[in-house]
Amino acid sequence: MNLRYLKNELWRQRRRTLTAVIGLSIGIALLIIINALAMAYRGAARAPLREIGADITAQRPGDVPKEMTGAVFPCSAVTIRAEQAQRIQELPGVRGIGRAVLLWVFDPDRAWIALGIEQQNSVGPSVLRNSVTEGRFLEPGKTESLVESGYARQFGIKVGDVISVGDREYPVVGLLDASRAAKIAVANVYLPLDEAQRIAASSKQVQSVSPFAPNDVNLLFIQADQAKIPELSSTLRDVLGEKATIGSPDSFLKLLGSLFALSDKFTYAVSLIAIFVAVLIAFKTMAGAVTERAREIGVLKAVGWANRDVVTQLLAESIVQCLAAGVLGLLAALIAAYGLSFLTVNIPIPWEMSPKPHFLPGGGDQLFKTLRLPVHIPWTLAAFAILLSVVIGGGAGALLGRNISRIKPSEVLRHE
Amino acid sequence: MNNGAIVTGAGLSKQFGDLRVVKDVSLSINRGEFVCLVGKSGSGKTTLLSLLSGLERPTEGHVKINGTDITGSNENELALFRRENVGFIFQSFNLIPTLSAWENVALPLFPIKMPGEERKRRATGLLERMELGGRLDHLPSALSGGEKQRVAIARALVNHPKIIFADEPTGNLDSTTGGAIMEILRELHRQAGVAILMVTHAAEYANSADRLIRMQDGAILS
């Protein structure tokens, strides 16, 4: 292989080189950006759960409360027994579990959406400690409350006030901006878990719909091995019943409604088409170029180039062109990814996962988690695209070079 | 001049389908001999030149170059054999359009492992001999017809061939330039003692050869 010849051939036949490089780079860019988009949607679908410190949420639907008085469970989240929670914690692939109790508390002068949370747990709503805007987060062993800042503003509640929820009073130790956090399990007031369990266990309305023991809960937040999430989603239904509501990245992905989000198969199919187009372009342009150069190849052979010398030269030209196409495609994809990362995506939060009584203001509104589409190109995808370009170049160069090197110089020089 | 045969063709025939282009031709070209092959278009001159140079395989017969029978050699062996023994000059020059003049001359040396500087030294030396020292980095598109043919002659000489096969080397040139090219070939023949087999239509050039071979209908007349 002669580098000088290679450089001259590619540089001095710029139009031909550019046609091949640009054609192939479009296919490569398409392949990268499609996969980056699919990954971005998958990343976006994980966001609502990740922000609540979980990979999966689990709850059980039940009957509608007969009367909206005192403490009731939303019909979307009824009792999960302590032993069921324990069983789930022991399932293979489960790395951690967060427990919570979500209640609607209808007091004579105010309705609360109350969420009982564990004060110290890295899984589940205790991650809301990062969303405290004033005061402090709940401390273990203390009977106190946090109030959502918008709700506090609406009703003039301040840190240091004492609020009455159900039959007990709770000092407000902090305000929390729920809009900064996930839209899952959003409440007006946050209480220690044992307090919410006590309120639920002592509520006749709760007990009449869904018997509840003091250690039971009605929301579970599960952290799991990424590879086990799909399998766990179905195993959880075995534990909690077929009607259990399981929130997972896959379920959010389906809600996104994007073609890229709907199906991995779509991404694979479009990727395959992009690869096919790239290969086709590479072969077509290079085959055209090689055919144009039949006479030149004949001269090379006449002056003493062996077949392998011709093949090696054409192979090197083809690989360099395809490598350049891969790099150009990657650059184009990086620019496109940067542009696409300004897009926002609205992820609908199912009402079941953040239930609010319909008769309260905003109760029927659809909640969305809005975020910028996290489009980025991982190095593995970039490396795959570059490697693929080289493989396409190698394949095209070897195949076309092998064919053209078989020509007899006398055949192409005959018109002399 | 007769120092033994550098090329020998024995009983050479070439058939393309039903058409027999060369018919049972036997001839030898001696070392350092300048032979012209003349004949009308379609008489089989170029095909005979291709057979003798190893560009084409005979349907029948044998070819020996420098004592080696190349008839049974495969394509790669023939290419290597041509690289070491043979130089070619074509009517339409057949220079590589993307390579400069000196790179075109060095083309037969590209597959050979040698320092790049040595390649360039050999190529530029030959181009200077062809009075093209000022055109080393010019592309073929920037050269005149005569200059292109002189580059092609330099290319034919770069591997120190024992014989040069020239197929109508003046065919695309005006008479003045053609005459100059013929003078270069005669000079090469005289000074370097390279054997030359030249196909030509031009009687004035043919007459200056050591030997004239006439072809008609695929056979040698004289």
Image (tube, coloured by chain):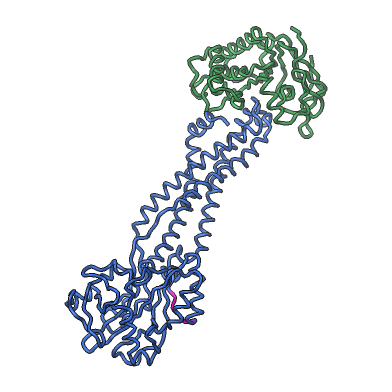
Chain colours: A blue, B green
Residue A229 lies, with reference to residue B85, above or below; the image says below
Q: What is the chief secondary structure element of the magenta stretch? A: loop
Quadrant including the N terminus of chain B = top right
Which residue occupies 36% across, 70% down? A121
Q: Is residue A174 left or right of residue A42?
A: left
Using the rendered view, name the quadrant where residue A301 is placed.
top right
Can residue B93 be seen?
Answer: yes
Q: Position of residue A319 (x, y in %)?
A: 54, 40
Quadrant including the C terminus of chain B = top right
Which of A199 and B45 lies nearest the eye of the viewer? Answer: A199
Which of A111 and A173 lies nearest the eye of the viewer? Answer: A173
Q: What are the residue bounds of the magenta stretch?
A: A242-246
Q: How many marks?
A: 0
Can residue B43 be seen?
Answer: no
Q: Position of residue A120 (x, y in %)?
A: 33, 71
Residue A101 lies, with reference to residue A204, above or below; the image says above
Residue B141 inside the magenta-drawn segment:
no
Residue A108 lies, with reference to residue B63, above or below; the image says below
Residue A244 inside the magenta-drawn segment:
yes
